[in-house]
Amino acid sequence: MAAYVAGDGTAFDRLFTALGPRVYGFFMRTFNNTAVADDLTQITFLKVHKARADFQRDKPLRPWLFSIAARVRVDELRKLHPGKHVALEDDTEAGDSVAPEPAPPADEILDEAARARRVRTALDALPEAQRVIIHLHRFEGLSFPQIAEALGTTEGAIKLRAFRAYEKLRQDLRGLL
């Protein structure tokens, strides 16, 4: 990114090659639509290009980039659901939770595809505000302070949502290990 900011045109290609698939995955986990993920990845990198002068070299790149991607994601959710409140915080009530799937019998051996489907179903059942945090934490390796900065909220709020999300996943996926 520093080379790109300094004017190296090929640096953007390297940046996109390195981080484009991760940003694409971020959008796929939210929208599960390749065309939407492609478009939003392009929009994100266009915004990175426009905001390149704002990049602070002493800060890590990925949280900065994912803060841009998170805003693009929220804009798309608002466009898809006009007039509906898009939860940036965890708005779920205790009664809103989905009942966990019963654990499979201990002697049932799940093949890898079934295991992956079960994990995907459990992730998809999480509220969007929690699912985003799991993605950034587990799949992108961002720390809770970095996620808080990327999403524009407090570290405490992020930790609480992560705790709730991981607890729900533990319940829904019990018996899988």
Image: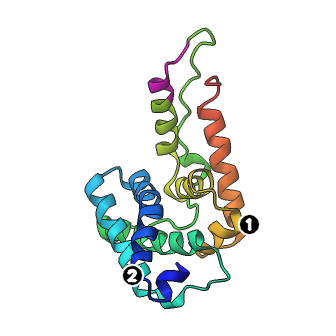
Of the image marks 1 and 2, the number of the one nearer the N terminus: 2
Q: Helix or strand or loop: what does disc 1 sit on?
A: helix
What are the residue bounds of the magenta stretch? 109-115
Give the vertical position of 149 relative to 7 (above or below): above
Give the vertical position of 15 relative to 114 (above or below): below
Residue at (49% x, 86% y) in the render = 5
Task: Indicate the amino acid at tag 1.
Answer: Gly
Q: Nearer the viewer, residue 108 or 34?
A: 34
Q: Is residue 113 magenta?
A: yes
Q: Depth-wise, is mark 1 or mark 2 nearer the camera?
A: 2
Find residue 47 and report its horizontal and vertical position in percent. 40, 80
Rate crowding at label 1 as few (under 14), some (14 to 19) or many (20 or more) other CA atoms within 10 Å. few
Residue at (49% x, 19% y) in the render = 111
Task: Name the residue beneath numbered marker 1.
Answer: 156
Is any part of residue 124 visible from this angle?
yes
30 vs 81, left or right, is right
Picture quarter containing residue 152?
bottom right
Task: Name the residue beneath numbered marker 2.
Answer: 9
Q: Helix or strand or loop: what does disc 2 sit on?
A: helix
Find residue 22 and report its horizontal and vertical position in percent. 47, 58
Find residue 39 and report its horizontal and vertical position in percent. 29, 65
Is any part of residue 85 visible from this angle?
no
